[in-house]
Image: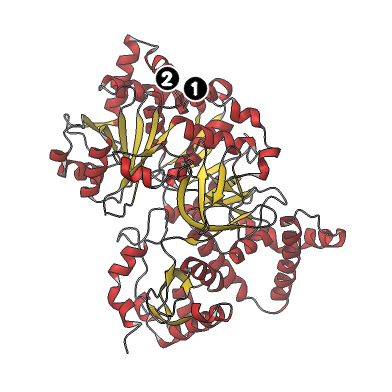
Amino acid sequence: MAMRSAADERCDRSILENRAPSVAALFRDRVASSGTAEAFQYFEGQQLRHVTWSEAKEQVDRLAAGLMSLGVELGDRVAIASQTRYEWAIADLANMCAGAATTTVYPTTIAEDVAFIVSDSGSKVVFAEDDVQVDKLKGVRAQLPGVLKVVTFDGASDGDWVISLADLRAAGEAALAADAGLVEARVDEITKDHLALIIYTSGTTGRPKGAEITHDSIVYEGASLDSIALLSSDDLQFLWLPLSHIFGKILLTLPIQIGFPTAIDGRIDKIVDNLAIIKPTFMGAAPRIFEKAYGRIKMMLEKETGIKKALMDWSFGVGRQVMEARSQGNQPAPHVLLQHLVADRLVLSKVRERFGGRVRFFVSGSAPLDPLVAQWFGTVGLIVIEGYGLTETSASTIVCRPHHGSYRYGTIGWPMPGTEVKFAGDGEILVKGPGVMRGYRNSPELTAQVFDEEGFFRTGDIGEIDDKGFIKITDRKKDVFKTSGGKYIAPTQIETAFKGLCPYVSQFLVQGEGRNYASALLTLDPDAITEWGAANGLGGKSYAQITQSPQARDLVQGYVDKLNAGLNRWETIKRFVILDRDLTVEDGELTPSLKLKRKAVAEHFKKQLASLYDG
């Protein structure tokens, strides 16, 4: 039997039932109700710019009319190849208002895959961030006969195939001068069943597969999150996640539903600096961001001694008592609350200041987050709630709520209102609801394979449910492997646990398929291990020299021993290798949302992995 969320009984169902027919209509409604309110923030050099909803609509309408003047019709596709930035958001909204579906292209995608994605999607126009993206398209132009124009944000126009954003805007202004109601008329034509988004994910055959997502699926996601009072118009979002990823795309739609502003900046190296400037009330992120911050601050705190260390230990102890009570929906004892006032003023609030000082909660998604890391953040008053979803289910499928008693560490929460979840015989999570894609583009056979006879989508993730309805992911079905002794090992759980134990780790990959024991390949965080090296006789050494030193190996061995103490005998890590470089997005070892790409890592370091079983 399918399970509906416990939150279904505690949500404002009228929001779900009266949702807009399209993202374009939703945007128009938002402008009508919040026109003079702030919609976006973005950096122009060092200056933080502010844009109202009405100002954003003026920009969007010009670009939408420009697209229509190029020949973009209702139901056509327009691609965006760019990192996360304000222009991405405006271009996407222009696509929505022109009745086109956005095809997302990661800026790190190689030219061959760009050609496939743009061609397979049938995109008529491509927004390209800069000359790097333009050059990729020019290199495969012969494979893109259907692309009418490339519109570049920062790159050079050639006056022919490649035009500037200003050129498109000028064309739109001319079109609107001739017909002021051009865009409004197109918005009126868009229905909930029209295609709004195609996101290509890795395919088992090597070719990406394009998940087709309708306007109603995207609008439903925003309405569903709105219905549980997750956020309000008083919030401020900091959005750095890749907008080519479904998580980022939904977080871009959520403010249109609710009416809060969003600060957009995709530069990962600027996240910490930007938090201090923007001072958001919430932010979505991948687990690696939380792991890195946790490790960094934890090491700093461990250096303290004497009275200062005693005060910090006491403060964190009090914070933990409050965190544990509130996560269970209970009120801490009065004397604990009084102690917490002191601990918060002296210590805990100082940690929160590092994240801007106004964060109400974080959302972690795209991969599992170790409960120890989430609990540490909760101890200092920063709630990190986990959510779950796939590209094919439009991201927010099962989500913890930040309200006391509505989240449980180590779980992904309850299904969203309007979404049904059930478990297959082997524990696989199956999902049905408005957020589920309509299918894979040009792949009816593949689409048929991922839906069961009742229309539930097969997620490929194994899970379980507890006594209060909270769901927990135990592993990715395809990642679970069997040792030569016949024992099954779920690597993700082990990897996540190690990241919660070791503040120096960056990436951790467990393997052992068909072998008689499990082993691991790991990398160390460059900042953390360099600082550790300076304090342990390795100052001035390179990353490779530090990570390959006997001292570093002894350090890691200590944490592996701690990990093994909590595992079943057949799960324990018998051998490991430390790489002399970290894994990167550029080398294809991490996704743009910082998720480990197992097959790519295994291929790149097959000699090192094989060495763990030599002899």
Crowding at mark 1 (Cα within 10 Å: few <14, some 14-19, many 20+): many
Above-or-below relation of 28 to 101: above
- Residue 487 x %, y %: 47, 75
Q: Amino acid at mark 1?
A: Arg
Q: CA distance from mark 1 to mark 2?
A: 9 Å
* In the foreground, 405 or 64: 405
Q: Quadrant of the C terminus?
A: bottom left
Q: Amino acid at mark 2?
A: Val
Q: Secondary structure at mark 1?
A: helix
Q: What scheme was used to colour the molecule?
A: secondary structure
* In the foreground, 496 or 60: 496
Which residue in the protein does label 1 denote? 28
Q: Residue at x 25, y 22 (%)?
A: 70
Tell me the quarter of the picture where residue 94 sits.
top left
Q: Is residue 250 visible?
A: yes
Q: Secondary structure at mark 2?
A: helix
Which residue in the protein does label 2 denote? 187
Left or right, residue 256 beside residue 174: right
Above-or-below relation of 331 to 301: above
